[in-house]
Image: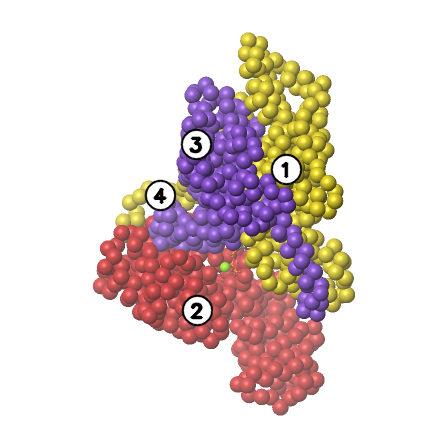
Amino acid sequence: MSGNEAMRASASVRIEGVVKRHGTTTVLHGVDLAIEPGEFFVLLGPSGSGKTTTLRILAGLEPVSDGRVFMDEVDVTMREPGERDVAMVFQSYALYPHMTVAQNIGFPLKMVGTPSVEVAAAVNEAAAKVGIAHLLGRTPGQLSGGQQQRCALARAIVRQPRLFLLDEPLSNLDAKLRMETRLELHALQRNLGATTVYVTHDQEEAMTLADRIAVFMDGRIVQVGTPREVFSTPRTIEVAGFIGTPAMNFVSGAWSGATVTVAGVPLAVRASTDQPREVKLGVRPNDLRIVAEGLPARIERIEDLGDSCIVSFAAGESHLKLKSDRLHPVKEGDEVRLAFEPGAEHLFDAQTGARL
Amino acid sequence: MTGRKPFRSLALAAVAGVGLAVWVFPVIWGLLTSFKTERDVLAYPPVWFFKPTLDNYREVIFGASSIMPNLWSSLVVSTSATFFTMLFAIPAAYALARLKYPAKRASGFYVLATQMLPPVGLIIPYYLALQKVGGLDTYSGLTLIYLTFSLPFAIWLMVSYFEDIPFEMEEAALLDRAGRLRTLWYVILPQVRGGIAVTTIFVFLNAWNEFMFAVVLGGNRVRPVTVAMFNFISVEQTQWAKVAAGAMLAMLPVILIGLFAQRHIVKGLTVGAVKGGGRR
Amino acid sequence: MGSGTKPARSLAAQERRFALALFVPALLVLLLTTTVPLVYLGWTSLQKLDMSMPWLSGFAGLGNYAKMGGDPRFWNSLVLTGVYTGTTVVLQVIIGLSLALLVLQIPKGQGLLRVAAILPIVLAPVVVGLFWRTLVLAPDFGLVDLVTRTVGLGSHNWLGDPQLALISVIAIHTWQWTPFAFLVLLATLATLPPDVYEAARLDRAGAWQRFWHITLPLIRPAIVMVVILRMMTALSAFAAIFAATGGGPGSATEILNLYAYRTSFTELNLGYGASLAMVLLSITMAISYLMFRLRRARS
Ligand SMILES: Nc1ncnc2c1ncn2[C@@H]1O[C@H](COP(=O)(O)OP(=O)(O)OP(=O)(O)O)[C@@H](O)[C@H]1O
Ligand SMILES: [Mg+2]
């Protein structure tokens, strides 16, 4: 790939105040995003939060109700999908069932009048990149799920688009294949250097693939950052609860000075406050410890996962989980005391859910 | 389910067999009759084994009352009606099934309503109008009125086939820079080839079998085979064997189509019935 | 990349333009071939237009409609239309459904039965009418007479006797179109999930209860659809009756459709024929409207 093409193969993307309404329901309430050239950018969020809608707006498949979309600082809001030079891999793959794999992959080139010799060469190259060069003569119906997925991928990369959009491309694969393909996808993107926007609701996928993540909640972006930032400093309680498995534990408490008092038990926290207030205290299961002094809790269940174990507790009203890679010498029904790794706590405003 | 009660399943088979024989037998009987001499036809009790003759067929093909010109008329008018129907129906059905445009629901309903029109209500104005412009006894006049029943039917049948395609198809093709027209041509139409074939068959069958329009708007030049058969019986009252031979010849195309496209016809009937189209 | 040169257009507007370009030709054809003629029909129905007495032609206002009130042949045709439509539709659904339920339990040979059922459907109604008139219903030599004579019921003039003629044309129509109901219902029944039946069996539902409480509700939409379509066909039935009896003897099998036709093209009274056709049109439209309302209310 020449330098010129490499430049062309990655665009910067910016969207400003994008609003999307379906009739009276608003599904996107003013979304802003700026994506760097060559970045692997993941849209993460629970089901129905507006990720697909955002992606389709980038593709031009969905008109915006308000706001603007820029690619390389050119306003493309009103531009048709075919004129945006973007490629998309659909969740259902949307392969053309009546065409062979080769015809599928070559279709986007054929449509711009590329000579058939060049099409054939490009098809072979793209198919080789995703490892389906031996399947070119088959039709999509004769492919396995993983092969179909690769075919869809090849169809997207063959034209070296400026922007590469993927909507949960791995969700139809089984767990093992998903893991493998994830790594390959990452390597492929690095190799091509194309700006990539990737939708998923699987936070593990997001963590491993993304340069940066945008977390969607109810039609809004609540946080943008690197996987590490999003994991370690979630901006709201929803983000904190969404990222990480098992989910972060939350207990209500009263914060004053450098202590949060939970169910009468004072727990030391790093930050201190002048004015006492109600907070939600969040602790990741990995950071929870069974100790001599701390929050009293009763063990409800112990799940042994082989390489690690998850212990569930009931502490007053709340249910907590602890994840550890060594088996604890405890059994179900035991009364224990819990604390957390110093400094591992997350504090959120009890009313607004914002990080404190 | 049935293994436990062999008697019951036998009885079931017998009832179903009788029911279905009732549908087949008249046609078989007609086929047999067409090979009989007129004397054998009127034998009582009826003869099952007789010396078959091809005289009846010779007569209706080469004789004075040959129906070959009528078969030709039927072929011309059915083919042209089918061609024009599909020409207009496929694009319209595609728009109706998959695109957004103003007053779409209303226009879909309009198409459905036109399908409900009784033919006798159309034939009077057509007769008067075609008479004025000299359009009686012409292929174009008959083709035009055939569109009245075949076009709405074909549109609705095609809609149900277009609806079966996943909606991402167009989006993928649009992103592949195919544009609307080439998306339709390269991506969508190849996927409804089966539906186009079934619809074409239905439209052709309906046109071939049509009688009322043909008898009023046809004439000496354009006389489809259905009309010819009708005239035949008025003239050749008692020559059943000849009538049977003519009928067999006239119905040969549709019977063959019916047998070969059997599976598709059932699907077409069901699709039409379930989705709300279909006059047959 | 050249994508910035085209003027920006909105996707929705472009889709709309494309859709209209595809749909409008068919719409125009339909307007021209169905709606304009209907308006002309309405106009004709207000005319005195008798080809046998062309000198009397002129505007008649609602005269043609008024004339119907005192026309016994019209009322007769209306009754016959009701009888013909009602009986043929009911018979088709009952026979078709029973047969479909039976055939569904036959493990083998369903394909053959389907082929057999296709046969009457693809035949031209006029040919069916001729067939029945000659080979099936003719006195002495027709198949039916052969049977009745063999079992000692004697020979009958099936198409010559007014009452028998009505029964005969109903039989012909039922013969030809029951396969439609049969095939559609068979296909619908075949798509029903078997686990529903197994669950019901475990609940100790008898065969009849299973049919009444499970099968029937599940296939109701298909039945309603079959009924609608069959009514439309029956209301505008023409060729088979025309070929078998011509509407006779007298007007014994003259349903409204045939009456409108004969008035227009045998007696050449096109004005009155048009008004009769308008009545049939209103009946058809009213019934389809009601049936679609019913269908929507159910679903
Ligand atoms: N055509 C439509 N009409 C009305 N509401 C819609 C339409 N399309 C999407 N929505 C709504 O918009 C919201 C966002 O949908 P979107 O598909 O973007 O979610 P998502 O984040 O991709 O979810 P998932 O992870 O389930 O795919 C949902 O609540 C959905 O119900
Ligand atoms: Mg989605």
In this orientation, which residue lies closer to the viewer: A220 or C99? C99
Instruction: Determine if marks 2 and 3 fall on one subunit.
Output: no
Q: Of helix, strand and loop, which one carries label 1?
A: loop
Check the rendered structure and report the hue given to chain B: purple
Q: Which residue is mark 4?
A: C8
Q: Which mark is residue A144?
A: 2
Foreground tag (2 vs 4): 2
- In this picture, residue B197 sits left or right of residue C115: left
Residue projecting furthest to the bottom: A329
Foreground tag (2 vs 3): 3
Q: Residues within 10 Å of mark 1 (few under 14, many from 20)?
A: many
Q: Chain of mark 4?
A: C
Answer whether labels 4 and 1 touch (C-beta < 8 Å): no
Q: Residues within 10 Å of mark 2 (few under 14, many from 20)?
A: few
User: Percent position (x, y) of residue C73?
Assistant: 69, 23
Q: Amino acid at mark 1?
A: Ala
In this orientation, which residue lies closer to the viewer: C194 or C52? C52
Check the rendered structure and report the hue given to chain A: red
Check the rendered structure and report the hue given to chain C: yellow
- In this picture, residue A167 sits left or right of residue B122: left
Q: Which mark is residue B64?
A: 3
Q: Which mark is residue C138?
A: 1
Instruction: Determine if marks 2 and 4 fall on one subunit.
Output: no
Query: Which residue lies at the image location 71% right of the left edge and 63% below the top edge?
Result: B8
Question: What whole-number distance in Å separates the C-alpha atoms at marks 4 and 3?
Answer: 70 Å
